[in-house]
Image: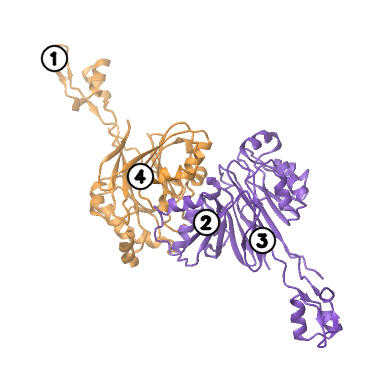
Chain colours: A orange, B purple
Amino acid sequence: MTFKVTVLGTGSARPTVSRRHSAQVLNIHEQFYLVDCGEGTQIRLLECGIPLLRLNAAFISHLHGDHVYGLFPLISSMGIMGRKTPFTVFAPAPFGEVIACHYRYFDTNLPFEVIYREVDTRSNEMIYENNVMQVWSIPLRHRVPASGYLFREKTPPLNVRKDAIERFGLGIAQITAAKRGEDIVSNDGTPIASNAEITYTPYSPRSYAYCSDTQSSGKVASIVSGVDLLYHEATFADEDRALAKETGHSTASQAARIALQAGAGKLLIGHFSSRYKDDTLLLDEARAIFADTELAEEKTTYEIPVVKNA
Amino acid sequence: MTFKVTVLGTGSARPTVSRRHSAQVLNIHEQFYLVDCGEGTQIRLLECGIPLLRLNAAFISHLHGDHVYGLFPLISSMGIMGRKTPFTVFAPAPFGEVIACHYRYFDTNLPFEVIYREVDTRSNEMIYENNVMQVWSIPLRHRVPASGYLFREKTPPLNVRKDAIERFGLGIAQITAAKRGEDIVSNDGTPIASNAEITYTPYSPRSYAYCSDTQSSGKVASIVSGVDLLYHEATFADEDRALAKETGHSTASQAARIALQAGAGKLLIGHFSSRYKDDTLLLDEARAIFADTELAEEKTTYEIPVVKNA
């Protein structure tokens, strides 16, 4: 029941030796998803020992080069490795045109399909679902249309409490019915026990939100309310808040205020401008507002632990 | 009078943690030129301390992603850094279309001009010249149109021998005339000394050839005849020579035979397939034919030293 994110790139438009273009990999119940894919992402994946062929899809926030330049090289390598299963790319328009343009000149014989799914950046809607999680788009405020992504684990199937099985002498069929959410009745219809008395959700569903690139937005805070782990861009420090506004970015303090407003469990900040020699400036500014803040570090995995119920 | 090449990437289509996509930087008399530009080239440049803004141009061999994927990210970063001077890209067609496609969607406000110069991959011709060197295209044999590049230092200006100045009592005007290549005559036209007697070329012009990607080609050997330093792809070992032929590549032995045939000073081999865990296999195969062979190593600079004349 894994739920973890490995950060691959924490730099902004101009990468440095230590902070590369934005990219992250989510592992949700052993299914892997890319979030953004800046230049060099495939190398970071190799360095982290994450097999390229395990990636199911990529969720791209917006069409600035530092969030997408690594995608076509990655797809190319997957082709060389003999991938057969489709790879889905969720991205704002006009990424479909970008893809079409690209494949006119490169990788004309990919052995697998690249499926493009357009993301409406004005909308907070479910864009992907499987049996264990959903992905929701988060409208962001940037210089170009941009969407963040909220990954919500689904409520796990009900379990039946051991003590209830003993107390009510439940048989297999009744246990199965209870797991389906039904109340327990005897053969002649007499109520034995309500579902709520005998079942429980084994753990609370977890969630992760990726919000980059964006200005500070109350709407974002509202959409990611209660998120366990929030990644929010913090390109600038307070002293550069005017520049943040001008370029459609956030300061570390603003990121922290969003986390506070959202009641997030924990905040990771990233997408740091290369102008700061020491990012702890940004960390301190964020922590003054939201204590449980960390600087996102590259090649580092952040796990959202399962919180088991009774 | 620098003439050196810094190797940035020595891998082939599928990069590894230790061998990245093809790219090299030439420094010829403190002018910098990129040769190929695979993914991650800008990071390698940063790691080697080579300022992006010092690059004058890029010479692209062919339109496979592992030779070009790093170009648009690099150009993007140069824009962010405020580049104003034009950047020229030499590449086979239809790279002009690739550029046009790209800038429809990205970096629509670059502060400098990207100039595209189409390279005819069927032709061995001079495609660039400045006051100290020329660049010649080298037709290669690959699965798509491909050109190698031959960088020839120009013959340096003549010097006048010190002993000749003394012996003939030459004045400034006569020394200047001699440097222009003229014979020395007295005021009344009496010959004093022939130009050949009193001048010399201070050093022999140097040359470097980049040949990747390509099958083995006698024509290439002929064009790069006498080159001081030859970089030739050696994607495969002998045991995989059938695969080399099928994919339009060379084996290490074939690269060595080209160096031998060309009378090269030294051979660097690169563009290694990721299938070989130990590249010394390739090195040994090449050295059995051409002793002065080295494996191209990333972030390593190879200097062609000046050979001074009398």
If you read the primary sequence from the N terminus, does the residue marked by circle 1 or circle 4 appear first? 4
Disc 4 residue crowd, few under 14, some 14–19, many 20+, Cα 10 Å: many
Please, what secondary structure does the residue beneath circle 3 have?
strand
Q: Nearest to the eye among marks 1 and 4: give it.
A: 4
Residue at image mark 1: A189
What is the three-letter code of the residue carrying label 2? Gln
**Subunit of label 4:** A
Describe residue A171's horizontal placement relative to residue B145 as left or right. left
Residue at image mark 4: A91
Residue nearest the observer in this picture, A294 or A214: A214
Please, what secondary structure does the residue beneath circle 1 have?
loop
Disc 1 residue crowd, few under 14, some 14–19, many 20+, Cα 10 Å: few
What is the three-letter code of the residue carrying label 4? Ala
In what quadrant of the picture does the N terminus of chain B appear?
A: bottom right
If you read the primary sequence from the N terminus, does the residue marked by circle 2 or circle 3 appear first? 3
Q: CA distance from mark 2 to mark 4?
A: 25 Å
**Subunit of label 1:** A
In what quadrant of the picture does the C terminus of chain B appear?
A: bottom right
- Give the residue drawn at x 51%, y 51%: B95
Disc 3 residue crowd, few under 14, some 14–19, many 20+, Cα 10 Å: many
Residue at image mark 2: B42
Q: Quadrant of residue B13?
A: top right
Check the image and report above or below for B166 versus B306: below
Residue nearest the observer in this picture, A113 or A265: A113
Q: CA distance from mark 3 to mark 4?
A: 43 Å
Residue at image mark 3: B4
Q: Nearest to the eye among marks 1 and 2: give it.
A: 2
Q: CA distance from mark 1 to mark 4?
A: 53 Å
Check the image and report above or below for B182 versus B80: below
